[in-house]
Image (cartoon, rainbow, N blue to C red):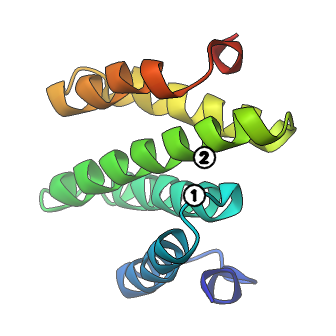
């Protein structure tokens, strides 16, 4: 359902972002070991971070933080699943997005803690 809502729509409203993320979250609950579910949830949260960052509004800071945290956790799960099940360019893209968030928001203690925890769950080869 999330993919259908995203299809052909490049300019999202906050409500559309929330709806799409909700469907992807349901997908991860239904299939907790699905690379695609976690990948798409991470990707949509990544796009939400970009959306709220471009708004430059004071109340966007909390939304950005929430989406960054969800994005990190989603990509970490996708990468850890993907590194054991497949070697593909999507896994590389997820890793690059994760690194982008780390470089941009790594000064936040919560972000640092999640990244540090990921070293235990992500295969070393994924980082290389």
Q: Is residue 97 above or below residue 14?
A: above
Circles 1, 2 touching at the beta carbon (< 8 Å): yes
For image coordinates 34% across by 25% down, the residue present is 117
Task: Give the total number of marks visible in the rendering.
Answer: 2
Tell me which corner region of the image, top left, top right, bottom left or bottom right, holds residue 109.
top left
Tell me which corner region of the image, top left, top right, bottom left or bottom right, holds residue 113.
top left
Tell me the tag on residue 66.
none
For image coordinates 36% across by 53% down, the residue present is 70
Q: Is residue 56 visible?
A: no
Q: Position of residue 71 (x, y in %)?
A: 43, 50
For image coordinates 31% across by 46% down, the residue present is 69
Q: Is residue 21 above or below residue 53?
A: below
Q: Position of residue 5 (x, y in %)?
A: 62, 88
- Label 1 Cα crowd, 10 Å radius (few <14 / some 14-19 / many 20+): many
Quadrant of the frame with the C terminus? top right
Q: Secondary structure at mark 2?
A: helix
Q: Tell me: 112 left or right of 80.
A: left
The residue singled out by tag 1 in the image is: 38
- For the residues labelled 1 and 2, the Cα–Cα distance comes to 5 Å
The residue singled out by tag 2 in the image is: 78
Q: Tell me: 107 left or right of 117.
A: left
Counting residues from the N terminus, which is met first, the one under dot 1 or under dot 2? 1
Quadrant of the frame with the N terminus? bottom right
Of 76 and 60, nearer the camera is 76
């Amino acid at each position: 359902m999330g993919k259908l809502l995203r299809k052909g729509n490049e300019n999202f409203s906050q409500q559309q972002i929330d709806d799409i993320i909700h469907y992807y979250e349901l997908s991860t609950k239904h299939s907790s070991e699905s690379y695609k579910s976690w990948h798409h949830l991470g990707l949509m949260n990544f796009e939400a971070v970009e959306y709220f960052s471009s708004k430059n509004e004071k109340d966007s800071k909390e939304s950005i933080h929430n989406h960054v945290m969800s994005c990190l956790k989603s990509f970490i799960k996708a990468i850890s699943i993907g590194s054991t099940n497949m070697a593909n360019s999507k896994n590389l893209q997820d890793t690059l997005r994760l690194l982008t968030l780390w470089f941009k928001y790594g000064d936040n203690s919560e972000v640092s803690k999640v990244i540090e925890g990921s070293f235990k769950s992500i295969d070393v080869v994924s980082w290389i």
